[in-house]
Amino acid sequence: MDTSRRVTETVFVITLGALLIGGVLFVAGQAAGLVAGQGGWLDFFNNFIKPPICIAASVCAVAGFLLSYKRLQKQSPQQQEATTR
């Protein structure tokens, strides 16, 4: 596997994990803020947690798009014999 694909896969996995964990944290924090009636919590999660999640999601999407292009495999030429009856 070439180096650029390995780097792209690593970026994809790291940003995917970050956005999934951040998303769970964001939703749980918003829910807790609503239940507790704390508007400051909602502002905190919107101002400080959401922007990094959106950046991670964007980077992950670009990396996933780049990974969708498969590298052409070198195939050994094999001769197939035609079978006739």
Image (cartoon, helix red, strand yellow):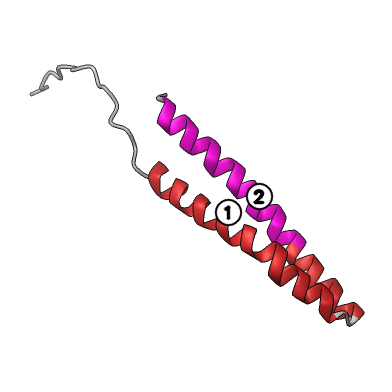
Q: Quadrant of the C terminus?
A: top left
Q: Secondary structure at mark 2?
A: helix
Which residue type carries mark 1? Ala
Decide: is 57 above or below 78: below
Q: Nearer the viewer, residue 51 or 25?
A: 51
Q: Secondary structure at mark 1?
A: helix
- The answer to whether the residue labelled 2 contacts the one labelled 1, judged by CB atoms less than 8 Å apart, is yes
**Residue 44 picture quarter:** bottom right
Decide: is 59 above or below 82: below
Q: Callout 1: 10 Å neighbours few (<14), some, many (20+)? A: many
In magenta segment, residue 74: no
Q: Is residue 24 left or right of residue 58?
A: right
- Image: magenta residue range: 3-25
Residue 43 rendering spot, x and y as whole percentages: 76, 75
Q: Is residue 53 left or right of residue 75?
A: right
Q: CA distance from mark 2 to mark 1?
A: 7 Å
**Residue 73 picture quarter:** top left
What count of labels does the image hold? 2
Which residue type carries mark 2? Ala
Residue 46 rendering spot, x and y as whole percentages: 70, 71
Q: Main secondary structure of the magenta part?
A: helix
Q: Nearer the viewer, residue 66 or 83?
A: 66
**Residue 83 picture quarter:** top left
Q: Residue at x 69, y 61 (%)?
A: 23
Residue of label 1? 56
Residue of label 2? 18
